Amino acid sequence: MATLNIVMVEPEIAGNTGNVARTCAATGARLHLVRPFGFEIDDKKLKRAGLDYWDLLDITYYDNLDDFFAKNEGAFFYFTTKALHTHTEANYPDNCYLLFGKETKGLPEELLLKNPESCVRIPTVSDARSLNLSNAVAIGAYEVLRQWNYPELQNFGQLHNYKW
C-alpha cells in the first residue's frame, strides 16, 4: 500500500488530535505529532476520541519542526487558509506528507512563504475563518486516497439485517 503521512504541528486540542488519530487508523495513514502540544498525550479526551483505534496507529513524535524535517523526506503539502491553490489541484505522490498547523494560528508563515507551490487550501465561504482541524485532515487525507483509488481500503459495506 502507498504511504500517506499526516503531520500535526503543535496541536492544541486533545479531541481534535484524537479524531485525527482515528482517521489515520481507519485509512492506514501514518501520524506524526510535532511538539509542543496543548495537552498531555495521555489525556482522556485524546484517548476517548480515538476510541479503540490506538492499536492500529503508526505514530511518531518529534520535539519540533526542525526535528521533523531532519528525520523525514518526501513531498510536503502545507494545508493553510492562506494558500493560492486548492487541495484538489495537487497531485499527491506515494509517501507524501500533509502538514496541518495548530488550531489557533495554523502553520508558521515563514514555512509557507518558503513553499508557495506546496501550500494548499480547502475552499470555504469568505466569512468562515477555517474548518475544524480534524475535519480538514479528513478532507485532505481522503482527497489523497481518492487520487490513489483508495488502495487496500474496504470499498463495500453490508447491512446488518438485510442483504443488498
Image (cartoon, rainbow, N blue to C red):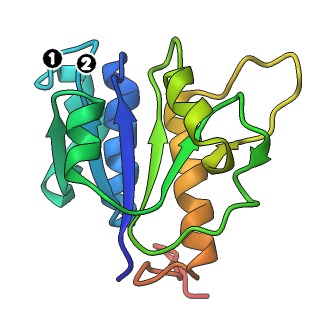
Residue 149 versus residue 46: which sits nearer the camera? Answer: 149
Residue 27, quarter of picture: bottom left
Residue highlighted by disc 2? 37
The residue under the point 38% across, 79% down is 2
Query: x, y percentage for residue 74?
Result: 39, 63
Residue 108 versus residue 29: which sits nearer the camera? Answer: 108
**Which residue occupies the extreme front position in the image?**
114
Classify 10 Å Cα crowding around label 1: few (below 14), some (14-19), many (20 and above). few
Say whether marks 2 and 1 touch (CB < 8 Å).
Answer: yes
Q: Quadrant for the C terminus, please.
A: bottom right
Q: Tag 2, which secondary structure?
A: loop
Amino acid type for the residue under numbered disc 2 = Phe
Residue 95 versus residue 157: which sits nearer the camera? Answer: 95
The residue under the point 12% across, 55% down is 55
Amino acid type for the residue under numbered disc 1 = Glu
Is 159 left, or right, of 19 in this rendering? right
Distance Cα–Cα, label 2 vs label 1 = 7 Å
Query: x, y percentage for residue 9?
Result: 37, 30
Is 138 left, or right, of 52 in this rendering? right
Looking at the image, is mark 2 or mark 1 nearer the viewer?
2
Query: x, y percentage for residue 17?
Result: 34, 32
Residue highlighted by disc 1? 40
